[in-house]
Image (cartoon, rainbow, N blue to C red):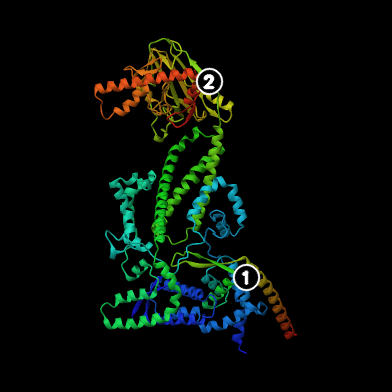
Amino acid sequence: MNIDNTASQMRKGVLEFCILSVIKQGEAYPSDIIEKMKAANLNIFEGTLYPLLTRLKNAEFLTYRWVESNSGPPRKYFSLTEKGAAFYKELEATWNELANAVKALSDAGQNNFNS
Amino acid sequence: MKQVININFQGRVIPIEVSAFELLKSYTDSLAKYFSNEDGKEEIINDIENRIGELFQERLKAGVTCITDDDVNAIIRSMGRPEDLEAVEETTSQQSNNTQQQRTEQQSQSTSTSQTTETHRRLFRDENHKVLGGVCSGFANYFGTDIIIIRIIAVLLAGVLIVPYLILWVAVPSSASVEIGGARKKLYRDSDDKIIAGVGSGLGNYFGVNPWIPRVLFLLPFLSFIFHWSHMAFLDFPNFIRFSFSPGSLMVYIILWLVIPEAVTTAEKLEMKGEKVDLNSIKNSVMEEMKGVKQRAEKFGQEAKTFAEEKGKTVGAEMSNVARRSSRSFGDIILLLLKIFGYFIIGVVCFVLVVVLFAIAIGAIGVFPLKDFIINDGWQNILAWGTLIFFIAVPVIGVITWIIRRLTKAKKSGRLLRFSFISLWIIGWASVVMLVASIAKNFKNENNRYAQPVALINPTVDKLEITGPDDITWYNARNNFFRFAPFTNINDEDTLYLSNVHFRIVKSNNDSFQVSIMKLANGESRKDAEQIAAKYDYTLTQYDTLLRTPVGIAITRNNKFRNQHAIVTVAVPVGKRIKIDQKIWKTPSGRVNIEFDNSDWDDSWGNEERGWTTNVEYIMKADGLYTMDGIPAYKEHHDGDDDSDEPVPGNIKKEIQKAISDSIKAQELKDSIQKNLQQPKQKAFNENKTNAIMIPTGLPIINSMMQ
């Protein structure tokens, strides 16, 4: 089993949740999302983001509107729909459960290892 | 040596090296292949291309002359190759199917917590949750509050906020900002197809219409000027539009000439036409670059062919769109014309608004010293300052700032600035409304009408002459702006004089002159009004046959302006004469309203402020006032108007006079018959006639019958 692969698999698993988290804070433009993820040390390819956004949009979790930009054509600004907000809540709950579980397990493992 | 071509990429003109272009092409193609099974394939590709276009733009803005292989490679690295994306797609699709399988990494946990940086938000009208214009929901979005709260505030302050609301409705862009495909045209002057400066053809290009349409629009005002078309129904614009129409179009043309850049380079020409089909734009630009070089043209032919084949499929989907765009139906043109016309109207309205704003500002600053003579101390004073600063000064400063920022092309977002100006202005509106309301309250009631007779020394004189004050020393030392009718101050700066005086000449019911004065004022209550009316002084002085009016009604900072006004009634006995001296004009506002009751008096003449000629003697006859020539006073004035430019020969004049007197006789006959028939009605009618009289200062005086 490749360590890189597993790590990136882990990361990718929560991508949607991360994207929704960013958008939840307010309308966001794809490159904003990338920037924020980068700032949080989560590096993904932009090419990954667009299909995800489109999928989330097609699933009616996201909606977007065109916003005129000072330079160049209008940009798509994404925001959460009500459905998306509900979805996010679920994901968040799941995430917290999971995070606690993982933490508990890994802590337990650590303690066992130490003792 | 590398060859550079211009491509139209997602509506942007991009100079790019041929090799880089090939790289880009193969990359987008690979993406297209990769996403071919995806649901929103075209959308994804489009989004990615859009982003790439933006990155290109950034590079170009940074100063590079063209996009190189390195640039494209860097972009591809950041966007990710299909191979990079592959793994992601699988897991993410899995993950979306089964969220329970999420796994974690310490890094990603921080994403949900460290996202505190502010997102770049802008104020938009929210079309999705709108009730009226979407302004409230836009604000709610902007501040992240509940719409309901904003709405409640808006409704509570409806009176104050209605104008800002309308302005915001117009000024704030809608969230449904037009979905412009990829091509974004830019406005250039078209030097290839110009008649004067290419403004017309440039506009034509921009709006996708025949250049002759803007040209004719520019010419129309001149033609209408020449042919006087304005009487035609559909060209019968309101006055201000027509005014701005004739010299306006020339000015607009010149301004556009100065403001719009000329399309010089190929890139600019492409931008001007907003060409969307990449193949075409490439062809055009390359053709230009390779003028006359046959071999290269052939090479281009091959290039174009392969390009067409590869791009054909993807373009195919867009083609229908493009076709719709390029073949404009008649309806579209009408729509565009309406749009242009609409913008024009909006422009004119904005211009007028700005002018009015500045006029109000200048006027307000001029009138402001008068405030002490009108408003009470305390709250009203504060509100007056609030009005001056927030309601008048703020928008003026705002407009100036905006213009300067526009001129200097300030890049920084003026959002905060705009927001603070708007909120300050809302405070201004609140002060205005409160100020007006509280002042209106002070003027709510009028005192009782009571005519005080003036004792004349010898009421049986043959002739009475009404004259103004002898000499007036105008207070001119410092402030010229104190001279606002009906306010004028004389002698010192603490007293204003109102010439709010109205003269009525009526027929006396006996053989002596009778003069009476009715002093009127407004106040918060009737009692207040009585006190105010009793306080001020307005007396006439008689010297033999002269009746002299005072300078005016004195207003001081303690005896404030409460619409003090006086009605002087002079009853002239039949057969006696009356004259108004020119000095009457010397009263502070420059005129005194004079009106005379006459059996033939017409309502419309009653408002005629110059219905009286000074320095002319009038004689009272049984049926009204006449000049010494025997012309009824109102006719005399009327004829004088008509005859002013072409003198009427004597005999014709006589005929006219005869005709007039005939008609008067007929009228008299009719009147007497009517009187006999319906005396009560007629009386009521007469009363109505004289009930409301506008005095020249614009303050209405409610006048009742005094006889």
* Residue corresponding to mark 2: B450
- Picture coordinates of residue B212, whole percent (x, y): 31, 59
Look at the numbered discs 2 and 1 and tell me whether their residues touch, using CB distance below 8 Å: no
Report the front residue among B596 and B453: B596
Mark 1 burial class by Cα count in 10 Å: few <14, some 14-19, many 20+:
few
Q: Position of residue B313 (x, y in %)?
A: 44, 79
Q: Which quadrant is the N terminus of chain B positioned in?
A: bottom left
Determine whether the residue tagged by mark 1 lies in a helix, strand or loop. helix
Residue at image location 45% in from the left, 25% down from the top: B501
Mark 1, residue position: B113
Name the amino acid type tagged 1.
Thr
Residue at 58% across, 47% down: B157
Q: Chain of mark 2?
A: B
Label 2 crowding class (10 Å Cα cut-off): few <14, some 14-19, many 20+?
A: few
- Mark 2 vs mark 1, CA separation in Å: 81 Å
Dot 2 and dot 1 within a common chain? yes
Residue A61, by quadrant, is: bottom right
Whole-percent x and y of residue B613?
35, 23
Residue under the point 57% across and 65% down: A26
Q: Residue B22: x, y in percent?
A: 40, 82
B13 up-or-down from B507: above or below = below
Question: What chain letter is assigned to the residue under label 1?
Answer: B
Left or right, residue A47 beside residue B107: left
Q: Nearer the viewer, residue B372 or B517?
A: B517
SS for callout 2: loop
State which quadrant residue B117 falls in.
bottom right
Q: Is residue B100 above or below residue B234?
A: below
Mark nearest the camera among 2 and 1 is 2
Depth check, front residue: B323 or B453: B323
The answer to whether residue B369 shows anywhere in this view is: yes
> The disc labelled 2 sits on which kind of residue?
Tyr
